[in-house]
Image (spheres, helix red, strand yellow):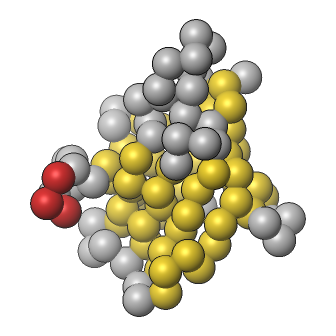
Amino acid sequence: METGNKDGNGNSHSYAGMWVTRDGYIRHELLPNGRYDEARGNRRSAYRGSYTIEGDHIEYADDTGFTADGDFREGVLYHAGMILYREHAKGEIQNG
């Protein structure tokens, strides 16, 4: 199992970074230390916790004990009924 954003060889995981819904309302930042920070609308850090990645599957555990999961498919994150796209420089999203 890969922990945080490191692959099995200790290299940075390709899924680390900012993921956003098309409207920008939900923002998941997958941090290099295996933590995530989720913002909702104007509420920064609405949820925080840890994540692990195995293959293209992500497991989230927030700091209150709530768990969720998702899957990366063709550069898109599908999580809890939401579709999130990788955010690039200047707020541009991939596949947006």
Q: Quadrant of the C terminus?
A: bottom left
- Residue 63 placed where, x, y %? 78, 66
Pick the front one: 80 or 19:
19
| Camera-side residue of 74 and 63 | 63
Q: Residue furthest right?
A: 65
The N terminus - image quarter: top right
What x and y, as percent, mark residue 78? 48, 50
Q: Quadrant of residue 2?
A: top right
> Could you tell me which residue is drawn at 34 percent across and 33 percent down?
74
Residue 47 found in image quarter: bottom right
Instruction: Please identify the residue farthest to the bottom as the structure is shown.
Output: 42
Q: Residue furthest top?
A: 9
Is 65 situated above or below 3? below
User: Which residue of the protein is positioned furthest toward the front in this rendering?
Assistant: 33
How many numbered marks does the figure carry? Answer: 0
Residue drawn 35% across the image and 65% down it = 21
**Can see residue 67?**
yes
Could you tell me which residue is drawn at 36 percent across and 62 percent down? 20
- Locate residue 17 relative to residue 50 in the image: left or right: left
Image-based side of 87 in relation to 44, left or right: left
The answer to whether residue 25 is left or right of residue 60 is left
Q: Is residue 45 above or below residue 96?
A: below
* Figure check: 18 above or below 16: below
Q: Residue at x 32, y 52 (%)?
A: 85
Taking the image as drawn, is residue 96 in sight? no
